[in-house]
Amino acid sequence: MHRFANPTRFLRLANAVLPWLGGLTAILFGVGLYQALVISPADYQQGETVRIMYVHVPAAWAALAGYASLAIASFTFLVWRHPLADLAARAASPIGAGFTAIALVTGALWGQPMWGTWWVWDARLTSVLILFFLYLGHMALVNAFDDSDRGGRAGAVLALVGVVNLPIIKFSVDWWNTLHQPASVLRMGGPKIAGEMMTPLMMMAGAYFALFGVLMILRIRSLLAARRLRQLRLAVQEI
Amino acid sequence: MGRFWAIMSRDLTLARRQGADLAMTVSFFVVVVVLFPLGLGPTPGQLAEIAPAVLWVTALLAAMLSFDRLFQQDSEDGGLDQLALSGLPLSVVALAKALAHWLTTGLPMIVLAPVLAITLNLDGDAYWALILGFILGTPIVSLFGTVGAALVVGARRAGVLVALIVLPLTIPVLIFGTLAIDAAANGLSIRVHLLMLAAILAAAIPLAPMAAGAALRQALE
C-alpha cells in the first residue's frame, strides 16, 4: 500500500488508468442512458416516470459508496498515516456530496408526480439528508485549520463518526414504515425487479461508479498540484 | 477514578466562578423560547402545537453555543497537554468533560423546559414526556457536542463549525424527543420514543468519548 504513497508513482498509474476509465464512463453512460430512456419498458403503474429511477438509484448508491470510501480513506490515513489517503478523503467528500445532491433532487422530481409531494420527512429521505450534511461538515472541517494536516486528521475522525449513519440509511426502509419503497435489488431472497429494467439499472450503476473513479483521480491530481504549488510559493518566499 | 472526579470538579468550579458563561447559555434558551409567542401572536392552540419543536430546537441551539469553549481554553493555556500527561485515557477525560458540560447546561435546561412549556401552553399530559425526553436527550447532546468540540480545537471560526458538525448528528434526538411529546399530547404511548432515546444514549456513552478521545489525540500532535 505504501508503494503508492509516492505521488509520482501514483500519478503515473492514475494517468495511465484515466483515459480508459474516462472512455468506459462515456460508453456506459451512452449505452445505459439509451437503454434506460428509450429501450426499457414503461412501468405498468408509474408509466414513463419510472425512468427517473435509472438516474436516481445509482446516484444514491454512489452517494453511499462515496461515504464508505471516505471512511476507508480516513481510516487508512489515521492508522497508517498514508499521505495519499488524506488526499483521497479530501477528494471524496465533495464528489459524494454531489452524488447525494443528485439523489435528493432526482428523488424530489420523481416524488412530485408519484407521491404528490416534492419532499416527505420519512426516515430514508431524512437520513440521506443527514448524509449530505455530514459531507458538508467534513468539507468545512477539513478546510478550517491553518495547518492542513490537522484538518485532515480532524476530518478523518469525523468521517469515521459519521459511519453510524450508513446502516441507518440502508435499513431505514425496513425499520420504519416509510413512504420510500423498500429495497428491491440488494435484498434477502434476490432482486425483485424485472430483467429488462435490471440491465439498464446495472449499466447506469456502472457508469456512476466509473464516473466516481474518474472524478477521484482528477481531484486527487489537482489536490497534489495545489499542494506542490503551495510548497513552491513558500520556497520562493524564503528566498 | 480520583482523577476523573478532579477533572469534572475542576470544570464545575470553573463554570461556577465564571458564571457568566453558564448564565449566557441558559438565558439564550429562555430568551429564544420567549421570542416565539411574541412572533406568532398569542394564539394558544398554535403555540401548543409548535411547543415541542420550539423547546427542543432551542435547547439544541443553546447547547451549540457552549461547545466551542469546552476544549478551546485548555488547548490555549496548555491545560490539554497536562490532561494528556495525567495518565488518564483521553476518552475518559472527554467523558469527564461531557459530564461536567451536561451538569452545567443540560441540567438547568431540564429544569427550565417545563417552566417554559407553561408559557407555550403545552398540553397538560405532555409534561412527563418533555421532562423524560430532556433527561434522556440532553446527555446525548453533551456527548455528541464533546466529539465536535474535540474535533474543532484550534480551528478558525470554531463556534460555527462545531454547530455545523454536531447539529446533523443530533437530528435523531430532536425527532424522538418531539415525537414523544406529540404522542403524549395525543394520548398515545411515549414508550417507543423514549426507548429509542435511551438506546441512542446507551450507545453514545461508550462510543462518543472514544471518538472524542481520538479527536483530542489528533489535536495534540
Image: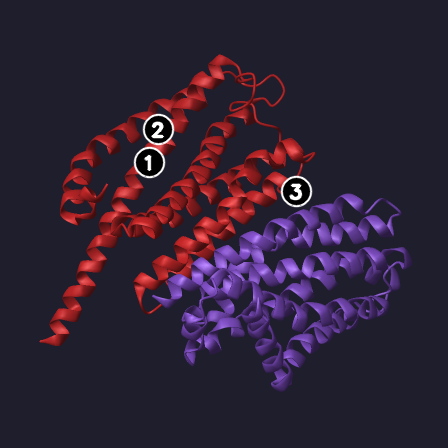
Nearest to N terminus: mark 3 or mark 2: 2
* Residue highlighted by disc 3: A120
At 31% from the left and 52% from the top, the residue drawn is A86
Q: How far across and down, in percent of the image, does residue A101 sit? A: 48, 45
Residue on which the image places disc 2: A29
Quarter of the picture holding the C terminus of chain B: bottom left
Q: Is residue B136 visible from the viewing direction of this image?
A: yes
- Name the residue type under label 2: Phe
Residue drawn at point x = 61 percent, y = 63 percent: B142
User: Do dots 1 and 3 share one subunit?
Assistant: yes
Side of B197 where B161 appears, left or right? left
Measure how far apart labels 2 and 1 are at the Cα level.
Answer: 9 Å
In percent of width and height, residue A192 lies at 56, 17
Residue B44, percent across and down? 88, 64
The chain containing the residue under callout 1 comes to A
Q: Amino acid at mark 3?
A: Val
Q: In front here: A61 or B134?
A: B134
